[in-house]
Amino acid sequence: MKLLQALFFPPEQPGGVSSMIPYMQERFTSPRWEMDLFSLPKRIRNKGREDVQFETFDWTKYQESPVVQKYMQTYRDYLWWTKLRIQKPYDLIHAHHPIAGLAMKSVFPDTPLIQTIHSSYERELILNGRIEPGALDHQFLIAIYGELEHQAERLLTVSESFRQYLTPYVKQPDVIGIIPNGFDEKRFKPIPHDNAIPQLVTVCRLVPAKGLDILFKACAELKGRGHDYVLHIIGDGPIRPDLEELAQRLGIYNETIFYGYTLHPEEFMPFFDIFVLPSRAEAFGSVFAEAALSCLALIGTDVGGIPEQIENGSNGLLVPPEDPSALAEALEKVMLDPSYRYELARSACEKAKTHYSLGRSVNELKKLYLQFASKA
């Protein structure tokens, strides 16, 4: 069976998709399976020129929005690149971004399409202050979900929470399948260590949706209570200067280390003690599974797919979003009790190995792919 995994970003880009798809390829290396990866290089900009129409809505009603204009130009670029680069036919295409799925179905209308929706672009834009709820760009982006449902033979997503989020925007939400991202255990090598000062770490894109302002305020409370710690920030993004200024203003700059973007944070994540990320929204939160496989104690917010990974008090701690004091209390609890911290980390690691292994995800996908084998 000839498979194409259609990504949007190149595989080396950060994110849940890149943490899984490239590592799947070796699991499909057999006489029965042949799998290729495809994505849009960053250098491809403003190449596409063709007129575009969708079958379920008229996108031109929203074309005054700069966000919609950029989205549609990227879609045209993806179409142009697909037609230029893909010459051979495939039995099945599995797309991991709406632009990738819609472009593939346009170019290969007779090839079955499985579409995984990994996250909510419009919700991220709202939380990051880029668009307003109900505005033209928001209406356009949620209309895309209905087009995807119409075009794809099967819709998937990564958590029950995100399936519920999609419910108002599709006709048959109950038939959306759920396959969480899977992670190759060989990438994660927990290391026994004993840090005299608790080492806190977060890994994310530096945008408002990740709630790092809340984390900094919580850390300021911890410092005010006399607790020593080091906070490691792995990632980059548009609000890094704002976060550095906030750390200085809160008096925690000396305790905070900004690393910038790192391609493989899992290589040194095991040397830290506590993973903390007070996101304002997460479809799944792949980085929590990665931190769990690195045997770190987990602290996250009770939003989106995070509580599907963290059972509060069992394999990590959940706190309400937008609550620095609650986050400070949770951090204090695991910082002051190394035995409790270890038990949380061990339980988190065991759950991640059981529920979020790459092998489990691959097996579920193979079963799904084989349903289309007779149609190939």
Image (tube, helix red, strand yellow):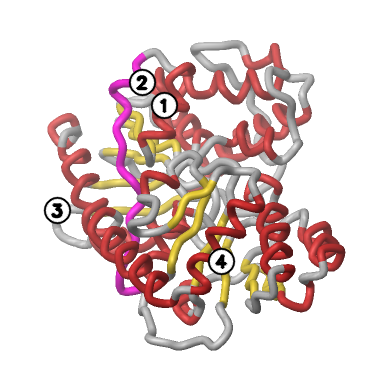
Question: In terms of sequence position, does the residue under pointer 3 or pointer 2 come before the other?
Answer: 3
Going from the N terminus, do you reach mark 4 or mark 1 first?
A: 1
Disc 3 versus disc 2: nearer the observer: 2
Q: Residues within 10 Å of mark 1 (few under 14, many from 20)?
A: some
Give, as a single range, the part of the protein colored magenta.
172-187
Query: Disc 4 to disc 1, how far (Cα)?
Result: 33 Å
**Taking 300 as reference, is 79 above or below it?**
above
* Disc 4 residue crowd, few under 14, some 14–19, many 20+, Cα 10 Å: some
Quarter occupied by residue 261: bottom right
Which quadrant of the view contains residue 162?
top left
**Amino acid at dot 2:** Pro
Give the residue furthest to the front: 225
Please tell me which residue lies in front, 80 or 326: 326
Q: Quadrant of residue 256?
A: bottom right
Name the element at disc 1.
helix
Residue 12 in picture, x, y percent from top left: 52, 63
- How would you rate the neighbour count of disc 3 (Cα within 10 Å): few for under 14, some for 14-19, many for 20 or more? few
Q: Say left or right for 167 vs 132.
A: left
Residue at screen point 63% across, 77% down: 229
Residue at point 30%, 21% (across, down): 174
Q: Circle 4 is placed at which residue position?
A: 332
Q: Which mark is residue 207?
A: none
Quickly name the residue at label 2: 173
Give the SS element for disc 2. helix
SS at badge 4: helix
Q: CA distance from mark 3 to mark 2?
A: 32 Å
Disc 3 designates what residue? 32
Q: Which residue is mark 1?
A: 164
Kind of residue sitting beneath label 3: Arg
